[in-house]
Image (cartoon, rainbow, N blue to C red):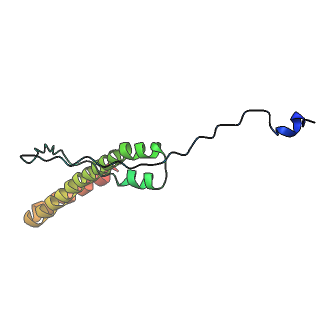
């Protein structure tokens, strides 16, 4: 008595093809190039790049490209703005010191006329205010 088909095959679909794993087979490297003369090295020397500390810190912290772009754009902008303010304050301080030195020298060297002139100036300033 033949066995029924049900008992002959558990799965009537064809077996799945399982791909074989890729095996790494190293190949020998090419021999290094031998030159008759030393090779010519063309080296371009450019101006030093700007400081990229902010970008490195941002990338190291996992911050996105927006922070890096902001560091590239606003870093030099901020340095320029602070330098401009410092130069302006230095010029104002120079003018104040020069005026103070001029007034002091007029008082010291002018004798009674210089003292009278400085008193007239202080009175004129008091009337304006």
Q: Which residue lies at the image location 13% right of the left edge and 45% below the top edge? A: 41
Q: In this view, does 68 lie above or below 6?
A: below
Q: Which residue lies furthest to the right in this view?
A: 1
Which quadrant is the N terminus positioned in?
Answer: top right
x and y, in percent, of residue 73 in the image: 37, 42
x and y, in percent, of residue 66 in the image: 46, 42
In the image, 53: left or right of 61?
left
Residue 90 lies in quadrant: bottom left
- The total of numbered circles placed on residues is 0
Could you say which is closer to the camera, residue 97 or residue 113?
97
Could you say which is closer to the camera, residue 13 or residue 74?
13
x and y, in percent, of residue 111 in the image: 8, 65
Q: Which residue lies at the image location 76% right of the left edge and 32% below the top edge? A: 13
Q: Which residue lies at the image location 20% right of the left edge and 53% below the top edge? A: 95
Could you say which is closer to the camera, residue 102 or residue 2?
2
Q: Which residue lies at the image location 14% right of the left edge and 45% below the top edge? A: 43
Residue 70 lies in quadrant: top left
Could you say which is closer to the camera, residue 23 or residue 99?
23
């Amino acid at each position: 008595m033949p066995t029924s088909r049900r008992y002959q095959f558990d799965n009537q679909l064809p077996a799945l093809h399982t791909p074989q794993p890729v095996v790494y087979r190293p190949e020998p490297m090419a021999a290094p190039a031998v030159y008759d003369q030393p090779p010519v090295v063309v080296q371009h020397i450019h101006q030093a790049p700007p400081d990229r500390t902010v970008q490195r810190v941002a990338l190291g912290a996992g911050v996105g490209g927006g922070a890096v772009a902001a560091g590239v754009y606003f870093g030099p902008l901020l340095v320029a703005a602070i330098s401009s303010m410092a130069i302006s304050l230095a010029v104002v301080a120079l003018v104040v010191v020069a005026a103070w030195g001029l007034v002091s020298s007029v008082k010291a060297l002018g004798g009674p006329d210089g003292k009278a002139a400085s008193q007239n100036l202080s009175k004129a300033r008091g009337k304006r205010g």
